[in-house]
């Protein structure tokens, strides 16, 4: 469908312009992401008066069962957005994990079951590709740490867009397979994410492609706001006291903050101070390190961690993530790979949620913050679980035991049960008949 034949519903669209986060210069709503004057990043702004007058809790609740119920807050002008059921993932009140950690009001926002590719990236890509189509792009691309490639390939397939994605060559098998299946062109680059990203910036200058996290980044990143909106709505139109989320580029973290602020601004929730705490892996923790050392700039690092999905050594939104954690009274912490594996197992064994390494990082940092007294046991705390464990099986292989191999005979089963470490956990008394 061409732009001319779409219903350009610009009267209901509230997004106004791109504005430089550093110097405030305004730009038209095109596929650009850097300020020409000061090289600051561009961000979408909205007409909040208009949103205040037109959006209510009721209009949102009457909307689709997806991120598109918040559409007035997203940078898409037409009714022709791509709805693949992304968003409105469960917010689960934690009982067993909370008790284990010694806190009372813990919630898990479970994007491990987001649609269609089981990570929070489906949110940002749904928005980016909807906007890309409006801007007339027919080929879509991205520089990815894995989940973004899955999401971009899947949603491009659904939308009938051509797709070429770039990934570091050493990604987990599940992430590679979970991209190839949708039939895009996949470039496995010999190098880490930061090198992939640099290459993509050059490609973006040469080819008229829509790179979701480069020239479309201002639109793409707005998709993460829905992680804030949903938590507010799912808590009964209230904000939590504290959130813990993983940091790669730092974008997701700052956009949850923007989402909460927007809901306050238009009167959908009451004003409240929310503390923002961020999670990184020791093997790629430039933001946590700057936080600990009280610096407001980061020193880029070469990533070396199993948490590949959040392994960005030179994170684009680091300074904004630092600012968000500091001004809200939060923290940014990092944990070892061993702690990340324990975090994955802890969440699985207590809540029945199998998350990937990024989620293990979040849970391990949550635990660390509770133990350090940096999360109050009474605070309403939300931990954001952003990806699915089936995609990073390598990370836990060898740490989770093996099935007991038995013959299809009752005595073989009983002998195995006798020998098994699990015996004391099971109700094994034979029933007398
Ligand atoms: C990309 C990603 C993140 C972090 O995203 P940023 O917005 O770059 O900070 C977190 N978790 C998972 C699973 C991801 O794939």
Image: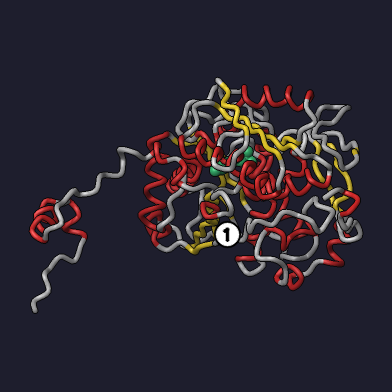
Residue 318: where, in percent of width, then height?
Answer: 66, 33
Q: Which residue is depicted at the point 72% across and 49% down?
A: 127
Residue drawn at the location 55% of the way across and 60% of the way down: 380
Q: Where does ligand 1 appear, by image quarter?
A: top right
User: From the viewer's perspective, is 206 left or right of 106?
Assistant: right
Q: Is residue 411 left or right of residue 330?
A: left
Say which quarter of the image contains residue 314.
Answer: top right
Q: How is the image coloured?
A: secondary structure
Report x, y in % for residue 208: 80, 31
**Where is residue 381 shown, x and y percent of the image?**
54, 56
Q: Count numbered badges in the picture.
A: 1
Reply above or below: 170 against 18.
above
Residue located farthest toward the bottom when viewing the structure as drawn: 433
Is 86 positioned to the left or the right of 392 in the image? right
- Between 353 and 173, the one lying in front of the other is 173
Q: What residue does disc 1 label?
A: 89
At a point 76% along the width and 55% down the height, the residue shown is 81
């Amino acid at each position: 469908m061409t732009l001319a034949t779409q219903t350009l519903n610009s009267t209901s669209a509230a997004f106004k312009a791109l504005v430089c986060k550093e110097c405030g210069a305004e730009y038209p709503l095109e596929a650009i992401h850097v300020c020409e004057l000061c090289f600051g990043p561009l961000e979408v702004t909205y007409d909040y008066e208009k949103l205040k007058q037109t959006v209510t809790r009721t209009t949102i609740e009457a909307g689709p069962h997806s991120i598109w119920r918040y559409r007035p807050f997203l940078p898409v002008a037409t009714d022709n957005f791509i709805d693949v059921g992304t968003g409105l993932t469960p917010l689960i009140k934690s009982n067993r994990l909370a008790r284990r950690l010694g806190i009372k009001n813990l919630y898990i926002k479970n994007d491990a079951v987001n649609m269609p590719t089981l990570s929070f990236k489906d949110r940002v890509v749904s928005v980016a590709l909807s906007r890309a189509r409006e801007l007339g792009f027919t080929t879509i691309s991205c520089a990815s740490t894995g989940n973004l490639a899955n999401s971009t390939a899947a949603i491009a397939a659904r939308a009938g867009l051509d797709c070429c994605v770039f990934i570091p060559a050493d990604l987990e098998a599940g992430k590679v397979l979970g991209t190839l299946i949708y039939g895009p062109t996949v470039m496995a680059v010999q190098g880490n994410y930061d090198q992939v990203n640099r290459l993509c910036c050059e490609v973006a200058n040469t080819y008229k492609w829509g790179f979701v996290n480069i020239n479309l980044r201002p639109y793409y990143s707005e998709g993460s706001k829905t992680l804030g909106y949903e938590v507010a709505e799912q808590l009964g139109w209230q904000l939590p006291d504290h959130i813990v989320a993983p940091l790669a580029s730092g974008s997701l973290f700052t956009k949850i903050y923007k989402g909460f602020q927007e809901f306050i601004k238009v009167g959908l929730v009451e004003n409240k101070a929310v503390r923002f705490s961020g999670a990184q892996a020791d093997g790629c923790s430039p933001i946590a390190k700057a936080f600990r050392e009280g610096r407001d700039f980061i020193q880029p690092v070469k990533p070396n961690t199993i948490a590949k999905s959040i392994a960005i050594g030179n994170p684009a939104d680091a300074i904004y993530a630092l600012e968000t954690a500091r001004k809200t009274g939060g923290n940014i912490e990092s944990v070892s790979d061993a702690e990340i594996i324990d975090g994955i197992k802890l969440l699985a064994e207590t809540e029945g949620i199998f998350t990937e390494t990024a989620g293990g990082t979040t849970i391990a940092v949550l635990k660390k913050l509770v133990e350090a007294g940096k999360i109050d046991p009474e605070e309403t705390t939300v931990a954001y679980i952003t990806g699915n464990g089936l995609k990073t099986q390598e990370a836990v292989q060898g740490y989770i035991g093996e099935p007991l191999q038995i013959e299809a005979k009752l005595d073989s089963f009983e002998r195995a049960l006798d020998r098994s470490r699990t015996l004391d956990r099971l109700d094994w008394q034979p029933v007398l008949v």
